[in-house]
Image (spheres, helix red, strand yellow):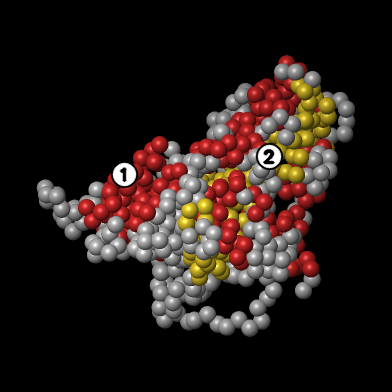
Amino acid sequence: MTARSELVGAPAARDLRLATPLRPDLLAIAEMVPNAGRVLDLGCGNGELLEYLVHHKGVKGRGIELSEVGVLTCVRRGLSVRQGKLQEGLADYPANSFDYVILSQTLPFLSDPAYILQEMLRVGRCAIVSIPNWGYWRCRLELLFTGRIPHAPDLPQHWYESPRMQAFTITDFAQFCAHINIRITQESYLSHTRRIQVRKFKTLLATTAVFVLEKV
Amino acid sequence: MTYENSVGVVEVQSFTFAEDEPFCLESGASLSPVTIAYETYGRLNADRSNAILVAHALSGSAHAAGYHSATDTKPGWWDDCIGPGKAFDTDRFFVICSNAIGSCYGSTSPADIDPVTGIPYGLHFPVVTVGDWVRAQIKLLDHLGIERLLCAAGGSMGGMQVLEWAAHHPERLRAAIPIATTAHHSPMLIAFSEVGRQAIYADPAWNNGDYYTSGRKPDAGLAVARMVGHITYLSEESMQQKFGRRLRDLERYGYEFQTEFEVESYLKYNGNSFTQRFDANSYLYVTKAMDYFDLTAECGSLAAAFAHSTELKFLVVSFTSDWLYPSYHSKKLVSALTAVGADVTYLDVKSAWGHDAFLLEVETMTDLLSSFLERLAREEGIARPAPVLDRSPLPVPAIKVQLSKEEELRRKIEALA
């Protein structure tokens, strides 16, 4: 019997699970997180990103998730996650508890995005936010030619479905950040699963954008 | 009944201390000697780092898992979660459960003989607190040669002990699992406790706690106390499901004061059966200890109480339909623990079973507990105990009955009563 297998819960089984590749937008976020930082993932879902960060980047990870299924999956992955609403969870953390606070594809669902972004930058030094882009060229054409509110390619949900969401574009978000005194310090754009390398027309070409935010 | 995944036949053990020097209690009184009844399951590993203390609730005992004899049909109170391959996996962990002082299952209690007077303590037994219970558990750990617990876990009153461990003895454990519990009783909870106590006081047979030699026990009072308590462990939904407004053996109302509704008959049965296994004075002492418990009293706030618990890992669990210790009591714990920087995992489990859910939601609890313990063991580098080469086979059960899920749940609920 090797020393490793004598340990309770040897990590062999976990490594297998990690062999499945991380979703491209989550990978874009993961690349922005430095090694060994303190990370809070808001709305961490099934813990896919958080597990990746803990095991590949050695971060000290925490999560907040509303759904019972999500929390249970996270606990099964060996993550430290608390169930609850983002507002309540964030409010409990003292200022500067984290290096990075992550909000992935959740912003359109928030009732008070300004408050959440400001809270993220209170408890964390930086925030990483990924957003679906309704300014994608196909969305623009769809509204023009069909007269219907388009689906964001990376958030395919009808306007009337629950949880309710608010459509907005990368341009909207950039203006909003400036308005609430938040600085975008790093950005990354994806068209479906591919990373966009060109400098121009990103707001037209991107289906998802990832930003690192800091206080002004 | 099958012994599959069971710790099998277990024996209650006892440890006596404070024979020469009395055990000083929080109240200022003292007790000498003190006996603690306890059971253990599984084995210690080489560096004695795999010990888990499981703390029982109000009417519980040290008998948390297994059977007391080969013909015993009723397993320990948390047998669903303690055993080989179960949530508290006894192949990996050494599980300890001890009976609270003042309770009537083998630890020193009001029914024992006071060495000073030579007659049962009765109300001369000193009032004990959750803090006293935990300090007695520490004496037991010292006796067992365990420097630091891997974890303390418990629901309800057991959860209070877990919180007491975390707040006041953080150096003696690595993790804490408080389930369906609170940092202090609200006035409503104290009120429910007091109704139970008043029912006992009002029984003439109680005789100011002096009834051990009279031949008459305050059973009527204790039964009412249990009925009130039992209602608080259920939920409106579970009672609706279980009893509705159904009548017992009757087509229509009898317009008389007999036991007519099923819920009445259920309460009566549970109240009476409780008097067969619990002591009225113990009920007074144990409920009083719960009422006194207040983590915030000493330091002013919960966060201050947990100021030294920042290195501990917590798994906090509550249940949506628990109105005795509602979820927001647990959420307050989670907020305070988050504020001090402790590592806290929290889930409010959706359940219709009320406070009893912590013993009934076996699947979710097993999932949560085993995952949390697996992570804990991995992160803390806890080795398995050395394998046993010559494991004598467990006694073969006399009868093997396959129970339906509903029947199994019904029996569990009966067992809780």
**Marked residue chain, label 1:** B
Where B45 sits versus B175, above or below? below
- Look at the image and tell me in which quarter the C terminus of chain B lies: bottom left
Toward which corner of the image does residue B336 lie, by quadrant? top right
**Residue A2 image point, x, y percent:** 79, 71
Say which residue label 1 marks: B195
Give the residue displayed 65% in from the left and 45% down from the top: B309
Q: State the residue at coordinates (36%, 40%).
A: B191
Q: In this view, does B41 lie above or below B306?
A: below
B125 lies left or right of B12: left
Depth check: give the residue in front, B195 or B1: B195
Disc 2 vs disc 1: which is toward the camera?
1
Residue B341 — which label?
2
Question: Can you give x and y, in whole percent of width and height, for residue B227 in the image?
Answer: 30, 51
Q: Which of marks 2 and 1 is nearer the N terminus?
A: 1
Left or right: residue B88 compared with residue B416? right
Per the rendering, the mark at residue B43 is none
Amino acid at pointer 1: Val
**Residue B82 versus residue B306 in the image, above or below:** below
Percent x, y for residue A67?
Answer: 57, 42
Residue B369 can be seen, yes or no: no
For marks 2 and 1, give the CA distance: 39 Å
**Tag 2, which secondary structure?**
loop
Q: Give the SS element for disc 1.
A: helix
Residue B213 screen position, x and y as percent: 27, 64
Callout 2 touching callout 1 (CB < 8 Å) = no
Can residue B299 be seen at all in this image of the molecule?
Answer: yes
- Say which residue appears at 54% left-offset and 30% top-offset: A160
Task: Identify whether B113 is placed above or below B398.
Answer: above
